[in-house]
Amino acid sequence: MRHYRNRYYKEWEKLSGKSEQTNATELSEEIAPAEVKTQVVPQSLITQFKKRFQNVEDLSNTTFQHIQLDMYYFEYLVTKEILQDRLKEFRHVTKEEIDQYLRESSFKELPTFNEIEYSIFQGNAILFYQEQVYELPVKDGESRAVAPSETETAIVGPHDAFVESVETNLSLIRKRMNTTNLKSIKLEVGTTAKRTVFLLYVEDLVSKEDIDYITKQIKSVQNDGIVDMNMLVQLIDEHPHSPFPQYYITERPDVSVYKLFDGKIVGLLQSSPHAFCTPASFFDFLESIDDFGQRWLIGTSIKILRYIAILITLFFTPIYVSVTTFHYEMIPQPLLPTLLESRSKVPFPPIIEALFLEFLLEMLREAGARLPTKIGQTIGIVGGIVVGQAAVEAGITSNILIIVVAASAIASFVVPNYLMSASIRIVRFAFIFLAGFWGNIGIIFGFGLLVVHLTSITNLRFPYLLPVSPMYKRFWKYSIFRGPLRKKKMKKQRQMSDVK
């Protein structure tokens, strides 16, 4: 199962002329970590440290006069028990023993100010001894406990989720993938406030060219204000002005492992509980890992239900506006008297009526998300019922439109990915405007623009609508639908022959 999509990604690389050969020298320069060279730190480095941290009153300093050593640290970033043990050791070290003591493996020499700045903000203590600077780890790596995801609920399968510690997130993936084929690349983003990024991939399932490409994309980011993975992917998007998400974001380790075995690259960011997966297609956002925990017929039926839900979300309200504005002949005759009676008390045209309810619904949705859980649920339910009923009685909107908007809202929740659901809801407003001004012709025109836009999007240089555009029907089984699981994975030679 996990090889099907990897096969059509490889076939697309072959047909589109993507070369599998990468300049080994250039790749090593981009990816290989820089060699750490031991050198004597100039005296100006200590002066630079004190100048840059001037007026930083939450910086703690401990001086050991008997060995002429200064220690700097942020008290709330370190583990106090470990720090106290280290302080006791330094108080008992003599001047004759300090040189040998600093050669222990727990101390790391820092030759540049950038390394010093990065280290101290990671919860380490900085030691100034004569003309040398050392890093002393005094943090035990405590983080938030692993708990179920609140945004990606699991019906079947594991219930753990990523946390803000990248080390913990790596362990959650490694525990599920006991293989040396899982490779990792460590990168940094930003200029002064640097953050660590790990790229994970399964060897032989991902081309070196794709790894090199995503590595260069991340290294080109010079923004220091990145606090979450959702911000990072916006800076490396190939189409940043598109309303549709291009990198698959997840909080669940089991989803990340599934994507890795599917031939994708997974990225983890320090201090972020999210991971990105690339390349991603439009159909990946309509897929849930729970689909594979059920019988394949049930999984396929649920996927088809999601496609229908997207059509309802996009077109149900615009079709109502179009029909009641320009195309009354499309309304079934038994329904026509009811519709006319419902709209007879409404003084606004259908487009104003629809936009009012849609904006009201979005405000209720946003208010429910920002308020505490119990209050938010109450606001969503009570607000929707009370405001909707009051709007009908006041003659601001019709009963039928209430049903149409409610059906569209319910259908939008069927999409399993929040980012894709939000994008579809935004695009729906464009269709409402087109339907209000040009009727069915406007809807058809808007749908054509939407298809053209989706076909123009790429992610990691792969088409966004793969395998529909370009067409690979034999790969629909595990991308558009949910086919039965295979007992054995196919051999690599069998895969390559199929691609040919």
Image: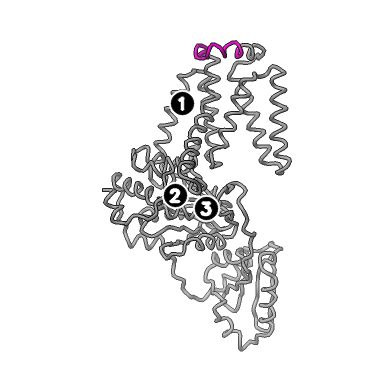
Q: Which mark is residue 446?
A: 1
Q: Residue at x 49, y 30 (%)?
A: 311
Q: Are marks 2 and 1 in contact (CB under 8 Å)?
A: no
At which x and y percent is residue 70?
Answer: 65, 75
Q: Which residue is mark 3?
A: 275
Dot 1, crowdedness within 10 Å: few (<14), some or many (≥20)? some
Badge 3 amino acid: Ala
Colour mapping:
one colour
Q: Which mark is residue 278?
A: 2
Quote the CA–CA distance across marks 2 and 1. Answer: 28 Å
Mark before the other along the chain sequence, 3 or 1: 3
Badge 1 amino acid: Gly
Dot 2, crowdedness within 10 Å: few (<14), some or many (≥20)? many
Between 271 and 254, the one nearer to me in the picture: 254
Badge 2 amino acid: Thr
Q: Secondary structure at mark 2?
A: strand
Q: Quadrant of residue 462?
A: top left
Mark before the other along the chain sequence, 2 or 1: 2
Q: Which residues are magenta?
A: 327-339
Q: Residue at x 70, y 39 (%)?
A: 377
Dot 3, crowdedness within 10 Å: few (<14), some or many (≥20)? many
Between 145 and 332, the one nearer to me in the picture: 332
Give above or below for 164 relative to 328.
below
